């Protein structure tokens, strides 16, 4: 599905979605070309908890928690350069 279809099917709801196909634009915006709705949630806090659980279980998959009141998804990609140790990251500025 695309975002506009998701908004029509799930009006005014918190969702956890997964990017099935996506790319990054030249201005570091993450463009989600095809997404799947993983779970509907009662509020933003519940959506964030589901997101965290899924991200821990499947760290290589691309999950987001969003509200369908947003007309467009505005996802800014950040580049991390550094060394990870456990759950901590050493951040190096480029």
Image (spheres, rainbow, N blue to C red):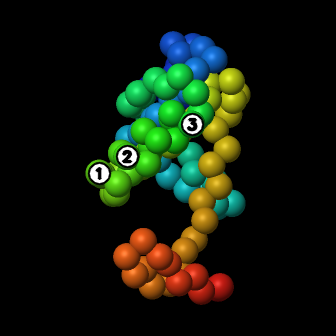
- Residue 4, can we see it? no
As helix, strand or loop, the secondary structure at mark 2 comes to: helix
| Residue for badge 1 | 57
Residue at point 69%, 29% (across, down): 70
Residue 56 location in percent, x, y? 35, 54
Instruction: Answer few, some or many: residues within 10 Å of disc 2's Cα (few below 14, many 20 plus, some between 14 and 19).
Output: few
Mark 3 or mark 2: whose residue is earlier in sequence:
3
- Residue 23, can we see it? yes
Residue at point 60%, 14% (across, down): 11
Q: Which mark is residue 45?
A: 3
Residues at discs 1 and 3 in contact (Cβ within 8 Å): no
Residue 40 location in percent, x, y? 46, 23
Residue at point 37%, 76% (across, down): 86
From the viewer's perspective, is 49 left or right of 8? left
From the viewer's perspective, is 58 left or right of 6? left
| Front-most of residues 16 and 20 | 16
Residue at point 56%, 46% (across, down): 31
Q: Which mark is residue 53?
A: 2
Q: Which mark is residue 80?
A: none
The CA span between labels 1 and 3 is 19 Å
Q: Nearer the viewer, mark 1 or mark 3?
A: 3
Residue 28 location in percent, x, y? 64, 60
Mark 1 or mark 3: whose residue is earlier in sequence:
3
The CA span between labels 2 and 1 is 6 Å
As helix, strand or loop, the secondary structure at mark 3 comes to: helix
The CA span between labels 3 and 2 is 13 Å
Residues at discs 2 and 1 in contact (Cβ within 8 Å): yes
Q: Quadrant of the C terminus?
A: bottom right
């Amino acid at each position: 599905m695309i975002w506009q279809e998701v908004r029509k099917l799930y009006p005014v709801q918190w969702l956890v979605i997964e990017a099935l196909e996506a790319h990054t634009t030249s201005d570091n915006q993450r463009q989600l070309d095809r997404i799947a709705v993983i779970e509907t949630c009662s509020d933003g806090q519940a959506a964030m908890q589901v997101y965290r659980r899924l991200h821990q279980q499947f760290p290589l998959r691309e999950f987001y928690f969003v509200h369908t009141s947003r007309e467009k998804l505005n996802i800014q990609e950040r580049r991390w350069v550094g060394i990870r140790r456990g759950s901590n990251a050493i951040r190096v500025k480029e």
